Amino acid sequence: MGDKIARADRYAQAVLQAMLEQWQRSLEQAGAAIGADEEVKGVLADPAADAAARRDVFAKMLPDNAPEEISNLLLLMAQEDDLDLIGDVSSILRESVSGQRAPMKAEVASAIELTETEQASIRSKLISDHGEGLLFTFRVDPNLLGGLRVRVGDHLIDMSVATRLATLRESLSSAVR
């Protein structure tokens, strides 16, 4: 029974890979056409252009065998003014299907230069909180006055003296009003 499931899994993976390649080719072609073709840019930038006109533009720029779902996705992205995300969608789609994530950036800003021991401690804590595969960057920002500002992906942890002073200033000025 295990061998049968393993074979079925290989077929399913082959189907997913073929679908992924078709989607990526179509998205890359659409992205290139949007960036280079003035007619395409004009229709997509025109607020008066209706869904049918945009669908026609996508039909012309996509491969003939592209699934209708790709055109529907592009139409939705155009309606939401998110066509600049085509490359990101393609990358995240590839990561989702392959089960691999791109490494996340961990940026640590401090008011003074951190020692190797302090950097190792911060690395250890962030890895335990966010998992392996972080790409660390340590830099000095004297404007912080003291403390740290840490950004992991889109998550920000601001423990700087400058931010604490700004928060205190806000609370005092709102109390005085």
Image (cartoon, grey):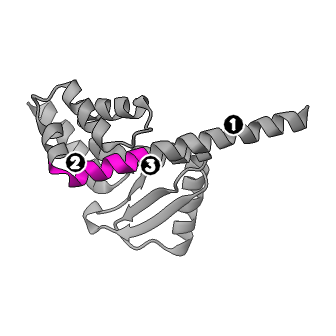
| Viewer-nearest residue: 63 or 33 | 63
Count residues near mark 2 (Cα–Cα under 10 Å), then give few for <14, some for 14-19, many for 20+.
few
Separation of residues labelled 2 and 3 (CA atoms): 49 Å
Which mark, by number, is residue 166?
2
* Occupied quadrant, residue 54: top left
- Residue occupying image coordinates x 25% and y 32%: 56
Residue 78 is at least partly visible in this image: yes
Task: Decide if residue 104 is on the left or right side of residue 156.
Answer: right
Residue 80 is at least partly visible in this image: no
Separation of residues labelled 3 and 1 (CA atoms): 20 Å
- Residue occupying image coordinates x 75% and y 38%: 9
Above or below: residue 34 compared with residue 106: above
- Residue occupying image coordinates x 33% and y 35%: 74
Where does the image place residue 152, in percent across and percent down from the top left? Answer: 45, 52
Count residues near mark 3 (Cα–Cα under 10 Å), then give few for <14, some for 14-19, many for 20+.
some
Identify the element where label 1 is drawn. Answer: helix
Identify the element where label 3 is drawn. Answer: helix
Where does the image place residue 101, in percent across and percent down from the top left? Answer: 55, 50
Task: Please tell me which of labels 2 and 1 falls first in the chain.
Answer: 1
Quarter holding the N terminus is top right
Residue range of the region highlighted in magenta in the rendering: 25-38
Separation of residues labelled 2 and 1 (CA atoms): 55 Å
Residue that badge 1 annotates: 12
